[in-house]
Each structure stands twice: as C-alpha cells, then as structure tokens.
Image: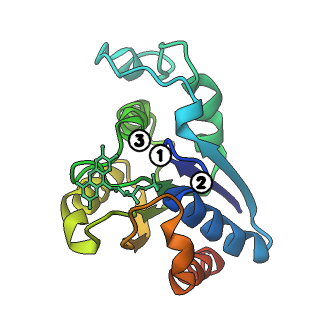
Amino acid sequence: MKILGLVGSPRKNSNTDLLVTAILAGAAKNKHTTEKVHLYTVDISACVDCRACKKGNLQCVLKDGMQKLYPKIQNANVIVFGTPLYWYGPSAKMKLLLDRLRPFIASKELKGKKAVLVVPSEEGADACNHTVGMFNLSLGYLEMTLVSVLLPKASEQAEIKKQPDVLRQAQTIGKHIK
Ligand SMILES: Cc1cc2nc3c(=O)[nH]c(=O)nc-3n(C[C@H](O)[C@H](O)[C@H](O)COP(=O)(O)O)c2cc1C
C-alpha cells in the first residue's frame, strides 16, 4: 500500500515531523511504500469557493503546488495528517490543505481511504478535542476513516525525542496500518 505523510509544521525535524517520520518508518517495515511531504514547502493557495470543482472534470482550477500534491493524495491508500496544535486547531498550512480537499467531495476519490492523525501540543491530548473532532467530521464527510489518533505532549523543538515510548507508539501505529 502507499502511505502518504503530510507534515503541517513549519519546523523541520521537530515534533510533528519526527512523529510522522516514525509512523512512516513503521509502515515501511511492513513493506508499504511511503512518502513524506512538508506542507510548508508547498505553495498552497486558499480555496476561493469558486465551485469549479463541482462541475465538469471535478478538479480544482487553482494553479499552484496542489496540482502536484493532488495525484499523491489520490494515489495514497492511507494519509497521515500531522499538524502541531495552533490555537486549538490545525496549523494554517494544514487548514489550507484541508480546504483544498473540496474537489473530493464531488469526485468521491478519497472514499474508503484511511487516515491517521498526529497532533503534538504543549498542553496535551485534552487540548486537541476540537481538532480531532474537526478531522473526524471532515474526513467522514469525504468518506475516509480515521483509524488512529496520536496526541502527545511536546512543545520545544524536537522535544518528542525525550519520549522514546511515544515515538515507538508512532512506529507501532505505522506497523499496524493495513
Ligand atoms: C502559533 C502557535 C499556536 C499554538 N497554539 C497552541 C495551543 O493552542 N495549545 C497548545 O497546547 N500548544 C500550542 N502551541 C504549541 C505547539 O503545538 C507545540 O509547540 C508543538 O509541539 C509544535 O510542533 P512542532 O515542533 O512540530 O512544530 C502553539 C504554537 C504556535 C507556534
């Protein structure tokens, strides 16, 4: 299977990145093909609600970095959404990405795909309720299934390295992807 990891933190090699990497490493051990994309390196414009994606070929007409990312999303069997908690929601870049998944409402191309959500935050799991709810409802709307959620406490750059048990948990989530 193809597993696509989306890193929604601007900090490379920090908590979100390390957790997504661990999940992908676990998946790779089970011979899955993995790919990681740093969303902050992709030019993603805001959805302008033009509704072009509801007509004709059901594709987004905005010409930006998403045109290369859309095929990766379409070809993945499992998508790992990694975002730091920013004001009790996803990072702005992750939200831009989520808004741009709108073509898949009409095309239903994400139907049946699985998702994993990982959200490191300073305050920990309880602070992530709204974000988990938002992903659950949004992915459900796209007829995807959220199969695993990991909400560790971490704040400083790469602080998650001090919690090898959590990184192992992330690897295990990846290993159990099927
Ligand atoms: C703009 C901004 C908003 C944040 N908002 C929250 C928050 O609402 N709750 C929380 O627990 N942590 C918050 N944090 C802390 C981050 O979630 C935390 O540092 C996380 O580990 C960052 O992940 P990263 O290392 O992958 O970038 C915020 C950080 C930033 C920069």
Disc 1 designates what residue? 8
Quarter of the render that holds ligand 1 = bottom left
In the displayed structure, does residue 121 sit left or right of residue 58? left
- Asked if disc 2 and disc 3 are in contact, CB closer than 8 Å, the reply is no
Q: Amino acid at mark 3?
A: Met
Disc marking residue 5: 2
Mark 3 residue element: helix
Residue 109: where, in percent of width, then height?
A: 51, 42
Q: Amino acid at mark 2?
A: Gly
Mark 3 CB lies closer than 8 A to ligand 1: no
Question: Residue at horizontal 77%, vertical 76%?
Answer: 29
In the displayed structure, does residue 90 sit left or right of residue 170? left
Of mark 2 and mark 3, the one earlier in the sequence is 2
Mark 2 residue element: strand
Coloration of the structure image: rainbow
Label 2, label 3: how far apart the Cα atoms are: 12 Å
Q: Amino acid at mark 1?
A: Gly
- Asked if disc 2 and disc 1 are in contact, CB closer than 8 Å, the reply is no
Label 2, label 1: how far apart the Cα atoms are: 10 Å
Disc marking residue 71: none
Question: Residue at horizontal 57%, vertical 83%?
Answer: 164
Q: Reply above or below: 93 against 30.
A: above
Q: What is the quadrant of residue 37 in the picture?
A: top right
Q: Quadrant of the N terminus?
A: bottom right
Mark 1 residue element: loop
Give the class, few, some or many, for how many residues have Cα within 10 Å of label 3's Cα (few <14, many ≥20). Answer: many
Q: Reply above or below: 172 against 109.
A: below
Question: Residue at horizontal 37%, vertical 48%?
Answer: 142
Disc 3 designates what residue? 94
Label 1, label 3: how far apart the Cα atoms are: 5 Å
Mark 1 CB lies closer than 8 A to ligand 1: no
Residue 104: where, in percent of width, then height?
A: 43, 37
